[in-house]
Amino acid sequence: MLAALTAQPTDQPTDQPTDQPVEIDLTSALTTPCADDAALPCWTADPDLWFAESPSDVEDAKALCVPCPLREACLAGALERREPWGVWGGQLVVSGVVVPRKRPRGRPRKDAVAA
């Protein structure tokens, strides 16, 4: 459980060591969005969109990631953690690997569709 972390106080100069640790509540630090997070698409869009079954929804999620300033870090973190699935950093990740596109459910047609 992430309850607290010991750190040096920020009000003292960093070149002088101190013996008094400061407790930081990591749980609230990790779950409380900062002002910049409000502009991130993953904070504003429907969370289910990032783990959608529909190929068109997956493409919509990938498009929302394009302007995100954290896109590269997001993808790198997902690949490092080997995320099982979802859209991370504008890419579809399945079993910890980037796949180019999501195929629809079912088997592909054997014959071309007559127009």
Image (cartoon, rainbow, N blue to C red):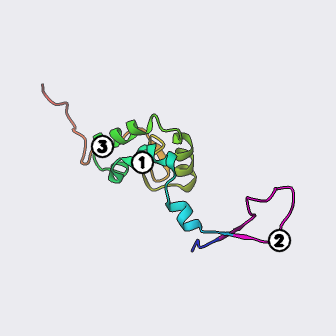
Quadrant occupied by the N terminus = bottom right
| Chain-order first, disc 2 or disc 1 | 2
Instruction: Decide which of 35, 42 is in the foreground and name it.
Output: 35
Where in the figure is residue 15, as x and y percent of width and height?
86, 55
Disc 3 on helix, strand or loop?
helix
Count neighbours of disc 3 (C-alpha within 10 A) and say few if under 14, some if 14 to 19, many if 20 or more: some
What residue range appears in magenta? 5-22
The residue mark sitting in front, 3 or 2, is 2
- What secondary structure is found at the residue carrying circle 2? loop
- Distance from disc 3 to disc 2, alpha carbons, whole Å, reads 53 Å
Quarter-wise, where is residue 2 in the image?
Answer: bottom right
Cα separation between marks 1 and 3: 14 Å
> Which disc, if any, is residue 42?
1
Label 3 close to label 2 by CB (< 8 Å): no
Judged from this view, the residue extending furthest toward the left is 115
What residue is rendered at 49% in x and 48% in y?
37
Reply yes or no: does residue 9 show up in magenta: yes
At mark 1, the secondary structure is: helix
Q: Is residue 48 within the magenta segment?
A: no
Residue 59 visible, this orientation:
yes
Q: Quadrant of residue 57?
A: top left
Query: What residue did someone put label 3 on?
Result: 57
Q: Are marks 1 and 3 in contact (CB under 8 Å)?
A: no
Which dot, 1 or 3, sits closer to the camera?
Answer: 1
Q: In this figure, which residue is indicated by the disc labeled 2?
A: 19
Instruction: Name the magenta segment's main secondary structure.
Output: loop
Asked whether, in this view, residue 21 is left or right of residue 63, the answer is right
Number of numbered callouts drawn:
3
Q: Dot 1, crowdedness within 10 Å: few (<14), some or many (≥20)?
A: some
